[in-house]
Image: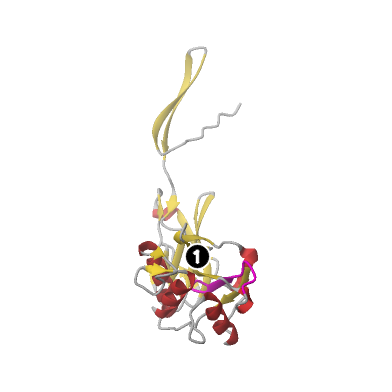
């Protein structure tokens, strides 16, 4: 016979095994939660950061990088950005493994991403007030995010989503979905509107499968997984 114990939360307890009111043995359990400090990191070349795994001794963790030429990791969990790109840092503890997605980007791109995340945390959606402080629609969010990095993504005197996409496309600053990097702009078409490629929406990709977007009055400015992949018509890379 096999006795299987499944803990539901961290803590200490004693399991008593008995049959016909006779105690056969007792098991003292101490359940701990083992987890990595974070599952995603955005950094620049030369930047370092210490990753840790809570709930176990540091000496029990074995660290590896899926792409050491992009991100290196020491035996103590210290990571360093080597060049632009992506890597997964794996922490193995016994039979268990934890992963952290790391993106290394130029400093200007990180400023754009940080601005988008700041807008998400502090601002509201409004198309009517889109050029006022603390109010954004989708295209002004993209515009001001990249303006914080010193790059003007308006085109033909306009900063609508369609104009931004046309400017990036005409300059050859586009990439495939599979090559998307944090800071890239994802442009969507949901219906025919007579604008460039019928584009009506843009979101800022911030890494680890997530975007910041100004979705509308009902939703506000949101941080969520990349939505509606089938409606993506262009991915732009400001530079």
Residue at (45%, 55%) from the top-left corner?
Answer: 61
Residue 36 is situated, as x and y percent measured from the top left of the image, at 44, 55
- Per the rendered image, the range of residues in magenta is 181-193
Residue at (51%, 77%) from the top-left corner?
Answer: 160
**145 or 34, which is in the foreground?**
145
How many marks overall? 1
Q: Residues within 10 Å of mark 1 (few under 14, many from 20)?
A: many
The answer to whether residue 31 shows anywhere in this view is: yes
Circle 1 SS class: strand
| Image quadrant in which you'd find residue 152 | bottom left
Residue 236's place in the image compared with 171, above or below, is: above
Residue 233 lies in the magenta stretch: no
Residue 207 is situated, as x and y percent measured from the top left of the image, at 50, 67
Residue 132 is situated, as x and y percent measured from the top left of the image, at 36, 73
Residue denoted by label 1: 211
**212 or 43, which is in the foreground?**
212
**63 or 227, which is in the foreground?**
227
Residue 44 is situated, as x and y percent measured from the top left of the image, at 43, 75
Residue at (62%, 74%) from the top-left corner?
Answer: 198
Name the main secondary structure of what is drawn in magenta: loop
Residue 188 lies in the magenta stretch: yes
């Amino acid at each position: 016979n096999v006795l299987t114990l499944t803990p539901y939360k961290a803590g200490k307890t004693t399991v008593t095994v008995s049959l016909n009111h006779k105690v056969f043995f007792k098991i003292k359990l101490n359940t701990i939660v083992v987890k990595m400090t974070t599952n995603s990191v955005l950094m620049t070349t030369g930047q370092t950061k210490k990753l840790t795994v809570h709930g176990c001794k540091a000496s029990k963790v074995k660290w590896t990088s899926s792409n050491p030429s992009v991100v290196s990791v020491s035996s103590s969990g210290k990571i360093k950005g080597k060049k632009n790109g992506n890597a997964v840092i794996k922490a193995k503890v016994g039979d268990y493994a934890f992963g952290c997605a790391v993106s290394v980007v130029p400093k200007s791109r990180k400023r754009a991403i940080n601005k988008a995340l700041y807008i998400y945390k502090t601002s509201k959606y409004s198309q009517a007030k889109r050029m006022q402080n603390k109010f954004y629609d989708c295209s002004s969010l993209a515009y001001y995010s990249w303006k914080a990095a010193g790059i003007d993504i308006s085109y033909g005197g306009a900063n609508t989503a369609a104009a931004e996409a046309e400017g990036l496309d005409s300059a050859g600053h586009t990439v495939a979905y599979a090559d998307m990097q944090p800071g890239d702009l994802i442009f969507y078409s949901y219906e025919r509107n007579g604008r460039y490629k019928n584009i009506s929406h843009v979101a800022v990709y911030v890494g680890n499968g997530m975007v910041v977007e100004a979705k509308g009055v009902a939703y506000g400015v949101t941080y969520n997984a990349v939505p509606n992949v089938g409606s993506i018509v262009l991915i732009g890379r400001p530079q």
